[in-house]
Image (cartoon, rainbow, N blue to C red):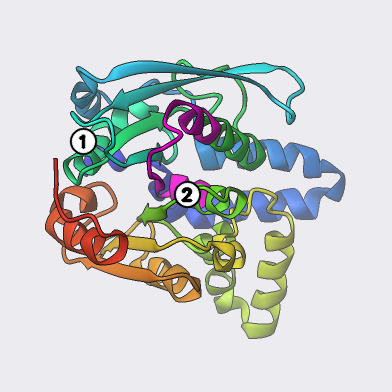
Amino acid sequence: MHTASLSFGSLLLRRPRWLLRGALAALATLAGVTSLEVQQRRWIFQAGLSSNPARAQAAAGLQDRWIAFDSEESGAPAQLHGLWLPQMTEDAPVLLFLHGARWDIRSSAQRMRSLHALGFSVLGIDYRGFGQSTPALPSERLACEDARAAWAWLARQHPQTRRYIGGHSLGGAIAVQLATQVDDASGLIVEGTFTSIPEVIGLNRRWRPLGSLVGSMIGSLIASLITQRFDSAAQVHQVKVPTLVVHGSADVFVRPELGHALFERVTAPKRFVLVQGGAHHDTHALGQAQCRAALGELFGMSNSA
């Protein structure tokens, strides 16, 4: 769809340009690694726009929440803005939702509503650098620290409630990391996510025209300079809770085979839901019935809101 044209996914579709920038930077000077890392953080997160106007309307009626904490990564106090969508019953399971790149949490309000319809109370947060959260240039380390802070806040607010971790696209990679770092989650749900940034970019595939050996060497060189790796494939085997992996068959931003490859590496109880015709931005809606059935099988959730 048009609103996705500048999304995280479309950035990855323009990977030849991304690779060219990375290759030129690598060949120009290895002393510029710090500068290259800054550029990676900008390209991958694409933070800066407040919300997608076409989707932000769904945020009407959601409740603001604020999470303050002292950041070990930055060495300064930080504050996260979140949106809260509760169920009518206080004992309903609670899900922390982690959004993808570019837009703030208001643009994921419809996805939050879809999760709410499956029976969850949902807290969605903005990482630092997004929306009304503390201004910063996001990074993998900062975003994962933000997710841990939000999870700790949920634990304080709902200590006796089953709590789940969910994420879409880039947020799915953050969700995987969070699930490896906490011991009080009841389950993990990721949608439209991937194995790692280098695999999404397809480094080796993009350089094959130069020959298998040369292409592999160039791909490996560029891959070695990627610091924002989001390597879920190397981490997901540490997840001990039931895991639901959802992907759309028509997702051209993050290919469904990457979602399935991530699923294959899960060692906990798991389900894979492939939503026929689902794209990167509408699989949550098209796959509602399939997800409801999978939640029943995997998490024992038998009713919806």
Left or right, residue 140 beside residue 239: right
Residue hosting label 1: 113
Location of residue 29 with respect to 203 vertically, above or below = above
The magenta segment is 151-174
Q: Which residue is at a point 72% across and 74% down the rendered structure image?
A: 217
Q: Which residue is at a point 66% across and 40% down the rendered structure image?
A: 141
Using the image as rendered, state which of residue 109 and residue 211 is in the foreground. 109
Mark 2 or mark 1: name the one nearer the start of the chain. Answer: 1
Q: CA distance from mark 2 to mark 1?
A: 21 Å
Q: Residues within 10 Å of mark 1 (few under 14, many from 20)?
A: many
Select label 2 or label 1 by which is in front: 2
Residue hosting label 2: 185
Q: Secondary structure at mark 2?
A: loop
Residue 261: x percent and y percent?
45, 73
Residue 266: x percent and y percent?
48, 70
Q: Which residue is at a point 61% across and 77% down the rendered structure image?
A: 210
Q: Amino acid at mark 2?
A: Ala
- The reply to whether residue 63 is in sight is yes
- The reply to whether residue 6 is in sight is no
The verdict on residue 159 being magenta is yes
